[in-house]
Amino acid sequence: MTARFAPGSRVLVKNDWPEERGPCHIRTPHYLRGRAGQVERVLGAFRNPEDLAFARPAETRVLYHVVFDQPGIFPADGKAPDKLLVEIFEHWLEAA
Amino acid sequence: MSNPARAESVEQLDRLVAALLAKGVVTEAEIAEQQASTDRASPEIGARIVARAWLDPAWRAMVLRNGTEGAEALGVSMAGAPPLGVLEDTAKRHHLIVCTLCSCYPRAVLGYPPHWYKSFSYRSRVVREPRAVMAEWGSPVADDIELRVVDSTADYRWMVLPVRPAGTDDWTEDQLAALVTRDVLVGVALPKLPA
Amino acid sequence: MSDTEHTPAMHDIGGIQRFHCTPVERDEAPPDAFGKRVDALRQVLARKGYMTVDELRRGIESIPEPEYFALTYYERWLRSIELLMLEKGVVTPEELT
């Protein structure tokens, strides 16, 4: 499976809220929606949990470790050098 | 707190297990064997991975590349378990692990997650104010260290490979492993020499 | 960015400030017998192909909010496992009464 983004790529997490549209199971934390980060590593490919959770046929999707500026996301409490490192599936990412 | 289960929940479990047993879906032996196997996993395994990495550069490179292989080399069965990733601390970077969505935890090498790891307060606070939590727990982080909060939300499970403390140059693997507590492996504490 | 524009799902609590008033409790007790049994049952059912961990989470996330916060950790697991076994027809409601 080919990864669309290479380590170092700037990416944007989709500002999408499927939980407002009905029952779903997603692994992208709310606080990252619409946020820009940088691909740290390609972690491999895994079956899409959004389908596995409902026992539907689940395609394999590329999973990335993406790093985000922590005070950029939590300005009131964050500290300058700190980062958030989170696993995000490719279908949640677009080029920034 | 980790309140004990209500009597009605224990009864609910008994009814479910009885139905599953009656239909041949599971057996008592399978449940008992699974519990025994889960009980055997403990932070001593993660501590061994770390202590060996402090002593052996080839081992260190291997576990950083593939933590699953490291666990298997210590005799842990990783078949069917999520892949294990090892995050390397440096003099300028420290990792701290949480799962804000549920309670993902490297059980194969740390055992059952403790209550606090699953608590709403830990899960909500650590991404927002990681330094406050670490300071409350007795491991304040210096201003010039980059703290990386790892929100473990998907298919990997993560453990921290901390920096080897100064003053341990002639220590054995067993002595080093004793410094590596579960809290150190989660990253909420830093290894400390006995006073 | 969600605090104003969107309401995150009940379980999606990273950074949510309603849980910030109390320090993290250092409760070191291992799971009790009930918790360990639920834990083991979940793993056996997963290994034998009756459910996935993703389904477990989806079941937990579907618990109505007041109960979600009233139940203990392994009580939420049990609720989800039971829901899944009923949903898949592995057991019937009559068998659980």
Image (cartoon, coloured by chain):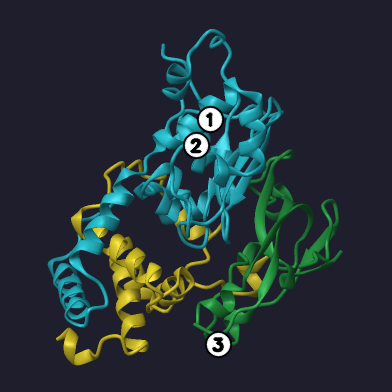
Residue A7 position within the rendered picture, expressed as x and y whole percent measured from the top left: 82, 52
Q: Is residue B129 above or below residue A66?
A: above
Discs 1 and 3 lie in a common subunit? no
Label for residue C26?
Answer: none
Q: Is residue A28 above or below residue C88?
A: above
Give the colour chain A carries in the figure: green
Residue B55 figure quarter: top right
Q: Is residue B124 left or right of residue B107?
A: right
Label for residue B185?
Answer: 2
Residue B171 position within the rendered picture, expressed as x and y whole percent measured from the top left: 50, 11
Q: Chain of mark 3?
A: A
Residue in the foreground of this view, choosing between C38 and B114:
C38
Give the colour chain C carries in the figure: yellow
Q: Secondary structure at mark 3?
A: loop
- Dot 3, how many residues are within 10 Å of its Cα: few (below 14), some (14-19), or many (20+)? few
Q: Secondary structure at mark 1?
A: helix
Q: Is residue A3 above or below residue B113?
A: below
Q: Which residue is mark 1?
A: B50
Q: Are marks 1 and 2 in contact (CB under 8 Å)?
A: yes
Asked whether residue C72 appears in the rendered view, the answer is no
